[in-house]
Every structure is written in C-alpha cells, then in structure tokens.
Image (cartoon, rainbow, N blue to C red):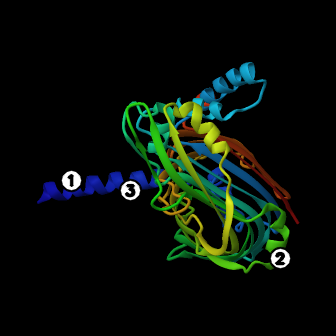
Amino acid sequence: MSRRVLMAAAVLSLWTMDAAAQLVPEGSQAARVDMGYRRMSSFRIDPFRHVMIPHWGFVFSFGATGENSALNFADFMAHTFLDDSTNGSKILPGDLLDVIGLIPVGKGVRVVGQAEGGFYLGGPFGRHLSLGFSAQSRAYGSGLIADGLVSLLRDGNLTQDRFDLAGSGGIGLATVDLGAHAVLRFGPLGTEDGMHLALGFGGRLVRVGAYYQARPQLGSSTVVRAGIDSIVADLAFETFETRIDDFVDRLNSAPSSVVGDFLIRMEWPTNGFTLEAMFANLGSVSVPNVERDTASLSLATADPRDDLPDAFDALNFQFADSVDVDVKLPQIIRFSAGAWANRILQLDVAATMPVSGDFETPLTMDLGTTWRFVRQFPLRVGLILGGHQGLGYSGGFALEGRNVFFQVAGQSLGGLFRNAKGAGARVDFGIFF
C-alpha cells in the first residue's frame, strides 16, 4: 500500500510541476496581449475576425485564396511560355487541352476560391460586451472537371469506350453582406485565475449580386465510343446566370436572406490556453429570376483533340426560362485551440470541417505559430494540412498598436513557389478612436 501511495505522490508532484511550468509569467508578452489579438489569424472567412478588437474603431479587411487539386504554377508557367512563343500570346482552345494533358491519370481537377473585402466598425462596452458591425462583399467559386472528361480530352478513345462527365461544371456566387455581431464575456469563473468564457452570436443580411452555374443536363453526361477510331457524343448543357449589367439593380430589388454565426471561446489566461468553436454561414440565400440557358452538342470524330475545341466553340446557348434558385452557402464549422509555449511563442491549431454541396471542400488543418519578440509586432509562420492541395505554408506580420492595427499575410498551397497549386493573401488595416 505504501508503495502505491508513494507512486501516486510522485505522479501528482510531476503533474503539478508540469502545470506550474505552463503558467504564463507575469509581465511577459504572453500575459499582456489583449484577448482580441490572441485569436488565431486565419485566411478563411471569419465573421468574428474583428468583433473583439480592443478599442473602438474601423478595420478595413481584404483577403482572397484560390487553389486547384492537380496543377502547380510550374505547369502553368511552362505552358504560358510555349503558348507565347507559338501563338503570340493568344490562348487557343487547343492550348487548354494541352494543360489538361498535364493532369495525372486517374485524377479530375477541382478548383475552388473565395474572396472578401469590406470594413468593420466595433469595439468594447466595458469588460463584458463587444459589438461589431460590418459591410462586406464576398465571392465564392468552385469548379470540377470530372475524371471522365479529363480522360476523354487527354487520351481520346484509346483507353476506354465510355466517359462519364457527371459532376463536371462550375458555380460562382457574389454577395453583399451587412452584419451585426456581439460577444459577451464572462469570468474569471471560480477563482481569480479561472476560465474566461466568451459567447459570440450575430447575423448577416445577404443579397446576391451575381450567380452563375454551368453543368451537363441530367441524363446527358455519357460519351460513348463508336468503332475503333471514332467517338460519338450527344450532350446537353445548361447554365444559370444573372447578368452582370443588372448587378446594381439586383442588389436594390433582390430579397435579403439571413444567415447566422455563432462562437464559443474558453480561455485560461494564467495558463495561456484557449479552446474555441465557431459556426458560420448557417443558412441559404435566394436568387430570384435566374436566366436558364441550354445548348446541345452532337459530335462524331476520330480525333477529339482537334475536333472538340471547334465543337465547343460552336456551342450556342439559347434562353429557356427564368427560375428562382436557393444557394446554400459554404457552412463553416471550425474548432481551434491555442497555447503559449513560453514568454513569446503562441501555438495554434484549427480544424475546419468538410463542406458538402455546391462549394464542397475537404477537412483542413491549420497549424500556426506567433512569435512576439516585441508585443506589438507579432511574426507568424504556419502550415496548412489537407484541403485540395495537400501541404501548404503561410507567413505574415502585424502591427498592433493603441491607435492602429495593420496585418499582412500570405500563403502558398500545395508547395512553395513554383510547386504551389494555389495561393492566398490577406491585408487588414484598422484605425482606433
């Protein structure tokens, strides 16, 4: 029995020593950083990005990311060089087929992107309440070239006799959002060193300015080989679009849709540890009077690489009817945790759950480090795991002063520089009263 007591005492002493080692020293950079600046900096859409800014003021925010699942910048640059030397900077349909020829066998191509820009006005009311108001323009885009279509364009009819084009197509959405968000702070709970709890909630009025979708019509997505050296195809396509010249009129007349955002954040300042869950873009938007156009393609060829570009050039879409469309925004479910490793180093990890639907994305992990050799001048370096691109890298810096806030960040997706399959950038500039 005494041996067990001694072992238990030893384990307890080691645990208490480890817990004490994790305490944030008084007067260190870790202890002096405001809660609004301790949240993990993210490239992704975040409605609570600046709601918890430590002072009342404006923040102008702009960010964009784009990526694809198959081709890197070196592929595109090599093709652009060859294209400029042969076509005099004119991109031809056959050039696009050459790019598709670079896609590895067995893989389709998915392209995704998002961008946002606008401003925030907000700040704290005492220690327990923060309010934020925002006006944002946002754009979402996603496209897929299915593996069947890639095989048809790259290999012709040499490898198989049926090509399923289902799923190929693209969708784009541009919105204008007006949002109001609040964060309630409670704590410390229990003791002076207890947990601080923050609950965030809010909503946005969303109006659609532009919408576009292109896809094969249902039941017309298979191309069949006829004979040894020929392909026969009868396809039908449809597009849904709002006209660009009606953008302002549409914003003035379109109905507003409401989407919700929620946040829960737990923080232990003395230990430098945080946990957070965020749920955003909860809802869909209505797009009335979308123009639906249709077109058909009939083709019989023994050389699809030469004949398909001319056939697609000859596609003529005709007006069919006008329809009302409900578009589900890409819902955001994100869990994150952060901890101070020492006086100057903050470590963060975030998991963004997969999204299905029109803007499908896989699970993505963000690993970030923030180095505060000077409290007001953090330096950031991170990794992105998952997504369509695999491994990615990020970096940036910020200036966090009493009267000004400035942040610049960039990311390389799927590799560095020439090996990257995507890129992103973000700039935030704030002026406090």
Left or right of residue 228: residue 173: right
Q: Is residue 314 above or below residue 260?
A: above
Q: Earlier in the sequence, mark 2 or mark 3?
A: 3
Residue drawn at the location 72% of the way across and 32% of the way down:
91
Query: What amino acid is labelled 2 in the image?
Result: Asn
Q: Residues within 10 Å of mark 3 (few under 14, many from 20)?
A: few
In this rendered view, identify the residue nearer to me: 263 or 371: 263
Q: Label 2 vs label 1: CA separation?
A: 72 Å
Helix, strand or loop for disc 3: helix
Q: Earlier in the sequence, mark 3 or mark 1?
A: 1
Helix, strand or loop for disc 1: helix
Residue drawn at the location 62% of the way across and 37% of the way down:
309
Query: What amino acid is labelled 3 in the image?
Result: Thr
Residue 344 visible at all: no
Q: Give residue 243's position: percent from left, percent from top.
A: 77, 63
Residue drawn at the location 51% of the way across and 40% of the way down:
300
Q: Is residue 406 above or below residue 89?
A: below
The disc at residue 7 is 1
The disc at residue 252 is 2
Left or right of residue 13: residue 376: right
**Which residue lies under the disc numbered 3?**
16
Q: Is residue 152 above or below residue 2?
A: above
Residue 92 figure quarter = top right
Q: Residues within 10 Å of mark 1 (few under 14, many from 20)?
A: few
Residue 161 visible at all: yes
Q: Earlier in the sequence, mark 2 or mark 1?
A: 1
Residue 306 figure quarter = top right
Labels 3 and 1 touching (C-beta < 8 A): no
